[in-house]
Image (cartoon, rainbow, N blue to C red):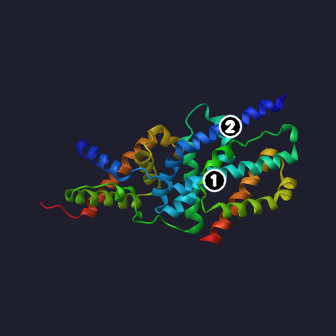
């Protein structure tokens, strides 16, 4: 019985093989996260220069990926522009820097969904 | 004086998140894929998971006490997947559109039957209750141990062990039923 059980487990392991993410997703995610950090950095910059921490490491990661030239660059630009457009409201409403970063991420995510819905 | 120190902290944090992302993108994507059943939504779920993770990474790292963050990451994906179904009143699609089993190389005709078995298993996984299905995905697709799965599902180690055992038993029965009655 337990042998049969072990056998079934090995079948299960073969059925549920890990799935590699599409290359486009990797590139898009790195670019998105890189841009997100950039936006957050700029907004923090505007609020409190003295305590600003420069989180631009993501761009180093994103740059080679961007160089490859994926088709989502334009869409991403649109997301960034739309997200930036709301920065004044966010600054007004944010209770703290952490809250501001949170709001930025939420807005970015919302705009990304909107753009994706428009495209697809 | 505090600024350079904060700079270093932030740089270290971003580097750590970058590492986390690189190490677990495949895990999150595999989980999402087997959870939602198609590549398009799996991509969306993966993207949302990492955006959420980025927002809460500093706190998660502080509270993790050095423990691996994979269960935390999968828990985010788990919660987002739950919202995904709730918001859109969807159910997982079955069969999974072109799962790993389909792309796994099979070189001889003798393996066709074996491939059908694997396909039946995958279809059976989609019939399981959510918690059992998730536990199996975490164990077999992601290779998580009981403790990691327990953390991801917010259960005790003991309860997780029982959950996995029952999930495998139930799946075995589903697959047997799908195969039809055996010859005497």
Q: Is residue B45 left or right of residue B161?
A: right
Visible residue check, residue B79: no
Picture residue at 66% right of the left edge, 60% below the top: A73
Please state the chain letter of the residue tagged with numbered disc 2 in the rendered image.
Answer: B
The relative height of residue A2 versus residue A116 in the rendered view (above or below) is: above
Task: Look at the numbered disc 1 and give the secondary structure of its residue.
Answer: helix
Query: Which disc, if any, is residue B42?
Result: none
Task: Look at the numbered disc 2 and give the secondary structure of its residue.
Answer: helix
Label 2 sits on residue: B13
Q: Residue furthest left?
A: B184
Question: Where residue B110 sits in the image (x, y, percent)?
Answer: 19, 57
Q: Is residue B78 left or right of residue A95?
A: left
Query: Depth check: B146 or A115 in front?
Result: A115
Picture residue at 25% right of the left edge, 42% below the top: A2
Label 1 sits on residue: A66
Query: Depth check: B152 or B17 in front?
Result: B17
Q: Residue furthest top?
A: B1
Pointer 1 local density, CA inside 10 Å: few below 14, some 14–19, many at least 20:
some
């Amino acid at each position: 019985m337990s042998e049969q059980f072990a056998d079934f487990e090995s079948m299960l392991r073969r059925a549920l093989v890990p799935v590699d993410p599409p290359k486009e997703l990797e590139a898009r995610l790195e670019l998105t996260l890189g841009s997100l950090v950039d936006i957050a950095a700029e907004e923090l910059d505007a609020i409190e220069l003295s305590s600003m921490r420069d989180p631009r490491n993501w761009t180093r990661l994103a740059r080679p990926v961007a160089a490859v030239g994926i088709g989502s660059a334009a869409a991403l630009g649109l997301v960034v522009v739309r997200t930036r457009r709301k920065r004044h409201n966010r600054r007004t409403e944010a209770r703290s820097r952490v809250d501001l970063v949170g709001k930025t991420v939420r807005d970015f995510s919302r705009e990304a969904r909107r753009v994706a819905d428009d495209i697809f | 004086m505090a600024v350079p120190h904060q700079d270093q902290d932030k740089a270290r944090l971003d580097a750590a998140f970058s590492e986390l992302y690189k190490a677990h993108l495949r895990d999150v994507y595999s989980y999402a894929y087997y959870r939602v059943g198609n590549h398009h939504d799996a991509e969306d779920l993966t993207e949302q998971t990492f955006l959420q993770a980025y927002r809460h990474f500093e706190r998660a790292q502080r509270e993790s006490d050095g423990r691996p963050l994979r269960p935390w990451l999968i828990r985010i994906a788990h919660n987002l997947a739950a919202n995904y179904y709730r918001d859109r009143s969807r159910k997982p699609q079955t069969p999974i559109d072109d799962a790993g089993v389909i792309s796994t190389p099979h070189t001889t005709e003798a393996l066709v039957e074996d491939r059908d078995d694997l396909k039946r298993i995958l279809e059976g996984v989609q019939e399981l209750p959510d918690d059992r299905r998730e536990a199996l995905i975490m164990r077999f697709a992601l290779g998580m141990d009981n403790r990691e799965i327990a953390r991801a599902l917010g259960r005790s180690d003991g309860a997780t062990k029982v959950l996995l055992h029952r999930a495998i038993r139930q799946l075995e029965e589903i697959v047997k039923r799908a195969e039809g009655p055996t010859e005497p």
